[in-house]
Amino acid sequence: MKLLKPYIIAGIVLSLIIIITAISITRDRLSTSGRATGSGTRYSSIFSKDNSYIFASPISALADGETAIRITVFLLDSQGLGVSGQKTLIIAPDEIEIDPVQQMTDQYGKAIFDATSAKPGDYTINVSVSNAVLPQTVHISYQ
């Protein structure tokens, strides 16, 4: 039994070294890939027009000049990560009043606008960033 104790202790020490090495390698990979670091985001200043999105909620509202439709823009890079600090502009017909709730994109690439209209109709909304119009559009209506 005395002969087995050194082997058991050596086995435990070796196992701990392997576990610590594996954890270290995993942390290095995560922090250099831009994921799972600090706040969970990576900041990029280059956005992808084709990988960015525009949402409207609800898509229909009263044409009373007060009931708003929330337009949310997600400006993403080619890897799907948010691009912060970009000024976004809504391109809308004159009948639509745009309130820029959050015109600059946040750490998730999100910008927020409220749209109202006193004139009933169906409208198409576009977004422009750095003189580039995103290919995505959103359709809203006021009744």
Image (cartoon, grey):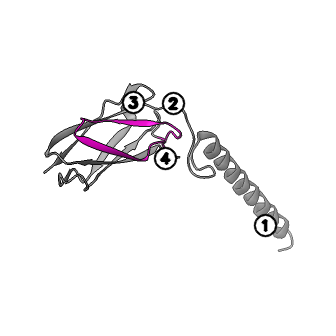
Alpha carbon separation for disc pair 3 and 4: 15 Å
Residue 8 numbered tag: 1
Q: Which residues are magenta?
A: 81-105
Alpha carbon separation for disc pair 2 and 4: 13 Å
Report the residue that reaches farthest toward the bottom: 1
- Image coordinates of residue 134 in percent, x first then y, are 35, 31
Question: Of marks 2 and 4, which one's residue comes earlier in the chain?
Answer: 2
Marks 3 and 4 close (CB-CB < 8 Å): no
Can you identify the residue that label 2 sits on?
46
Q: Which residue is nearer to you in this view: 84 or 128?
A: 128
Residue 123 numbered tag: none
| Category of crowding for the residue at label 1, using alpha-carbon neighbours closer than 10 angstroms: few (below 14), some (14–19), many (at least 20) | few
Alpha carbon separation for disc pair 2 and 1: 54 Å
Question: Could you say whether the residue bearing mark 2 is in a helix, strand or loop?
Answer: loop
Q: Which residue is nearer to you in this view: 94 or 39?
A: 94
Q: Which residue is nearer to you in this view: 4 or 63?
A: 63
Alpha carbon separation for disc pair 4 and 1: 50 Å
* Residue shown at the point (43%, 45%) measured from the top left: 111
- Image coordinates of residue 137 in percent, x first then y, are 27, 36
Alpha carbon separation for disc pair 3 and 2: 10 Å
| Category of crowding for the residue at label 4, using alpha-carbon neighbours closer than 10 angstroms: few (below 14), some (14–19), many (at least 20) | some
Can you identify the residue that label 3 sits on?
49
**Amino acid type of the residue that numbered disc 4 sits on in the rendered structure:** Tyr
Alpha carbon separation for disc pair 3 and 1: 59 Å
**Amino acid type of the residue that numbered disc 2 sits on in the rendered structure:** Ile
Question: Of marks 4 and 1, which one's residue comes earlier in the chain?
Answer: 1
Quarter of the picture containing the N terminus is bottom right
**Amino acid type of the residue that numbered disc 3 sits on in the rendered structure:** Lys
Residue 108 numbered tag: 4
